[in-house]
Image (cartoon, rainbow, N blue to C red):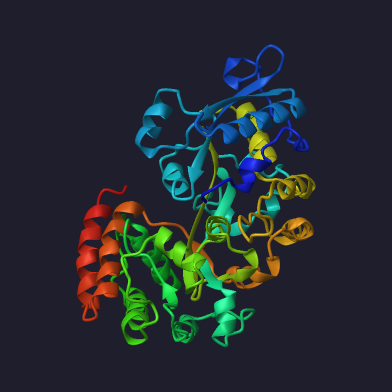
Amino acid sequence: MPGISRRQVLGSATAVALSLALTACGGSGSSPSGKDENGVVTISVNGMPAKTQALDRQNFMEDVKAFEKGHPKIRIDAREGQMDPKTFAAKLAGGQLEDVYYVYFTDPAGLIQRRQAADISEYVADVPFHKDIDPALMKVFKDGEGKTYGLPTGNYSLGLLYNRSLFAKAGLDPDKPPATWEEVRTAAKKISSLGDGTVGYADYSKNNQGGWHLTSWIYSMGGDVAARQDGRWRAAFDSEAGRKALQALHDMRWTDRSMGTRQLLEIADVQKMMGSGKLGMYMAGPDNIPTIVKQFEREYEEYGLTALPGTATLGGGDGFMFNPKASPEKIKAGLQWVQWKYLRSPEREAVDSERAKKSGVPIGLPQPRLFAGDTQAEIDRIHGRYANTPVENYQPFIERNAQVETKVEPPNAQQLYTILDGVMQSVLTKEDADLDALLAEAAKKADTVLASVK
């Protein structure tokens, strides 16, 4: 999200060192193991911020120093960048790939299929709190046989962000936001009837953002944007779910007139509308709230968040995987680094939360939310203790989001979003748009884009 994130501020040398009780694995101590004559393992990791991000980079390097102090047998060779699909294969073949590398949730399936990531199943069971990581997030890093190839370190999912003040003004209960798309439609009509330029619901339709949101609409209706058929990927949105999504948008835009007359919007436009107090609802992740509060000088108490209606939503996140050529010693050391820096224990979470509150970083937003069970419950209690945002306003999101499946982006997502942008634009700017024709034509274009996916 724009601005300084919590993770950036919390990366400091005063973090509590938490060591892993990983079982020692046999190794000769020779160079292939990664150990030097003193038994120190050096691992290369990426994800270090660029020099242009001075504060982020400083915090990252302070974390490296703190980690090495608490783990004297491990040295971190930190490098800039993330996983780049265009150069990944060449780096792996040339021996230049980091031992521990950053990925988005869209990457693991292909990397696992091409055997470009190490199987860490025999080591990951010893990572503290491993069993408490949300199974849906762990699934991203598993193959069909249940083997594990990485760990999640961040996540998000799209929900419904709403203006609590406008809800109350329209006679709606801010503590009971819409749970179905029909309820969204009803609420949007009531809010737009307030007049004075107030819009009930808004959505994106350009710069690939329209396709991004339409994907989540289709997921929520029980459909897919792309599916694998007979060994190849094909468009899947020319379906009942696709038509229901477009019909809902069309009806709010043209029948109810609850989406306003201004269209061809993108995220900055919609955030400005919400920040001006003239928008009731829009599809968004939790990170939109601090952006609006900071940029438009609003108050956190003005906004609520609930889960997206329907059966599923679009989500994503990030994590780390391991070089398939890495030795067991390097993999174990890499797991210690990833767990220490990104998968914080409740004890370390308390230290970080106290520091974050002093720095004015928002505490209490409902994501990232990596754990389940008792571990997450304890972290929630810690966040509640240090919260500087109204956590009760996000309870509708937390309570129902577990019932909504989070699905990752389709293959060649950005190219598909460009195609789906056109569909969104037609529906929102042409009252007589032929929904079936739009879907059929877009599907033909999408099949061409998907033909290159292996």
Q: Quadrant of residue 432?
A: bottom left
Vertical comparison of 229 with 33: above or below = below
Q: Can see residue 35?
A: yes
Q: Residue at x 59, y 77 (%)?
A: 165
Q: Residue furthest top?
A: 37
Total labels: the figure holds: 0
Q: Residue furthest front?
A: 196
- Which of 275 and 4 lies nearest the eye of the viewer? 275
Q: Quadrant of residue 193?
A: bottom left
Q: Is residue 59 left or right of residue 47?
A: right
Q: Can see residue 324?
A: no
- Which of 244 and 117 lies nearest the eye of the viewer? 244
Residue 187 x, y percent position in the rendering:
49, 84
Residue 203 x, y percent position in the rendering:
39, 69
Vertical comparison of 399 with 294: above or below = below
Q: Is residue 254 left or right of residue 197?
A: left
Q: Residue at x 42, y 57 (%)?
A: 409
Q: Residue at x 68, y 11 (%)?
A: 37
Q: Is residue 144 left or right of residue 339?
A: left
Residue 420 x, y percent position in the rendering:
29, 63
- Which of 361 and 365 lies nearest the eye of the viewer? 361
Vertical comparison of 340 with 186: above or below = above
Residue 441 x, y percent position in the rendering:
19, 67
